[in-house]
Image (spheres, rainbow, N blue to C red):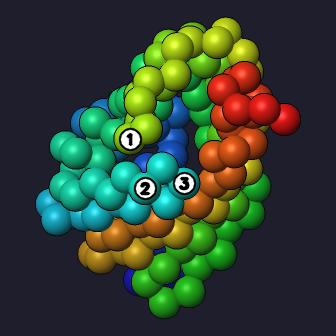
Amino acid sequence: MAEQDLIRIARENIEAFNAGDWDRFKAALTPDSINDEVATGQRSQGPDQIAQNAQGWKRAFPDAKGTIAHVIASGNTVVLELTWEGTQTGPLVGPGGTIPASGKRQVTRAAFIATIQGDQIKESHHYFDMMALLQQIGAAPR
């Protein structure tokens, strides 16, 4: 598969998240896809579970948007450097508990690494600075 095709598949996943289009989001994932969200320790398997995790972020940050800054593709792997931003107007539910809505805006840099199989994401690893995010919404001291 050409690098442009790999990049298109990875971008599609971010664009579907941005739009809150969960059918489109899940269509970009293989039936046995795995997502490892390193910052939270959440590991999701299958399109439904991965989408549920993403929907949790959208409930906490309804205006959440990922903006891709750089892209690298090699073999069957795509790396996206992106910035997530949004305002926390809903509760942020995570493995450590629930953080009430703060009304504060956050901007967090991240890396998303996706392994492509066929024309879908088979496995993804999402790295972002959780401490910076928590500090920006007032849930951790600066």
Q: Crowdedness of circle 2 by 10 Å Cα count: few (<14), some, many (20+)?
A: few
Instruction: Read off the residue under disc 1.
Output: 95
Q: Amino acid at mark 1?
A: Pro
Residue at point 43%, 56% (across, down):
41
Q: Crowdedness of circle 3 by 10 Å Cα count: few (<14), some, many (20+)?
A: some
Numbered tag placed on residue 39 in the rendering: 3
Q: Position of residue 21 (x, y in %)?
A: 36, 30
Q: Secondary structure at mark 2?
A: loop
Q: CA distance from mark 3 to mark 1?
A: 11 Å
The extreme right residue here reads 142
Whether residue 126 is situated above or below residue 71 in the rendered picture: above
Whether residue 85 is situated above or below residue 1 in the rendered picture: above
Count of numbered circles in the view: 3
Instruction: Read off the residue under disc 2.
Output: 41
Q: CA distance from mark 2 to mark 3?
A: 6 Å
Q: Secondary structure at mark 1?
A: loop
Q: Position of residue 25 (x, y in %)?
A: 34, 43
